[in-house]
Image: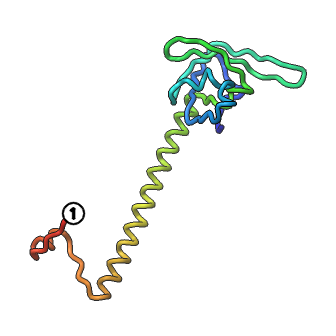
């Protein structure tokens, strides 16, 4: 996940769980502490401890939810699911701007296609009128 905290989380950071699908039941148990939350869900990191085995180092985080409930998650299993709140907000804003831009592109494309269609119809001898003009001409338009 883009901008996930992985092993970068610090005490007092606010992190967000959002847009995560937990998939099949057989992997659900690994994420059950997070999977029960409606998304977006916000947590505060109240403890961050680096753990290690012979082969790797990883983080264990104690999270507190908005109800004050605390629970532990480990970075290999859950750190990739959580995003620091400022990065999350920035990504949401970028996605919103992108969606507005994409909608405007669609509107412009449809408007252009409409103009082409009008030109074709006029060249074929069909008269194009507005709703007001149609009313003045006594033409009943059902919308």
Quick one: SS at disc 1? loop
Estimate the x, y position of residue 66 in percent, counting from the top left.
50, 17
**Residue visible at 9% across and 74% down?**
138
Quadrant occupied by the C terminus: bottom left
Location of residue 109 with respect to 44 vertically, above or below: below
Provide residue 120's location: percent of width, then percent of height. 35, 83
Residue for point 62% across, 23% down: 32
Relative to 124, residue 110 above or below? above
Q: How is the image coloured?
A: rainbow
Q: Count numbered badges in the picture.
A: 1
**Residue found farthest to the front:** 25
Badge 1: few (under 14), some or many (20 or more) residues near its Cα, within 10 Å?
few
Residue occupying image coordinates x 31% and y 88% = 124
What residue is shown with label 1?
Answer: 143
Q: Is residue 114 left or right of residue 84?
A: left
Expressed as whole percent of the image width and height from the top left, the position of residue 28 reads 65, 28
The residue under the point 68% across, 26% down is 78
Closest to the observer, 69 or 91? 69
Where is 103 relative to 142, above or below? Answer: above
Quadrant where the N terminus lies? top right
In the image, residue 134 lies at what x, y percent? 15, 73
Q: In this orientation, which residue lies closer to the viewer: 90 or 36? A: 36
Q: Does 119 sit left or right of 133 as displayed?
A: right
Q: Is residue 136 left or right of residue 80?
A: left
């Amino acid at each position: 996940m883009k901008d996930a905290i992985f092993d970068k989380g610090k005490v007092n950071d606010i992190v967000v769980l959002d847009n995560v699908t937990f998939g099949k039941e057989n992997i659900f148990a690994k994420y059950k502490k997070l999977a029960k939350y409606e998304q977006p869900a916000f947590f505060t990191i109240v403890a961050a401890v680096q753990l290690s085995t012979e082969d790797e180092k990883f983080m264990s985080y104690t999270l507190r939810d908005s109800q004050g409930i605390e629970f532990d998650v480990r970075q290999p299993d859950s750190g990739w699911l959580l995003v620091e709140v400022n990065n999350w907000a920035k990504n949401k804003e970028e996605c919103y701007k992108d969606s507005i831009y994409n909608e405007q592109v669609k509107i412009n494309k449809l408007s252009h296609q409409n103009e082409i269609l009008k030109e074709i119809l006029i060249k074929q001898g069909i008269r194009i009128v507005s709703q007001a003009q149609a009313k003045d001409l006594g033409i009943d338009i059902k919308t």
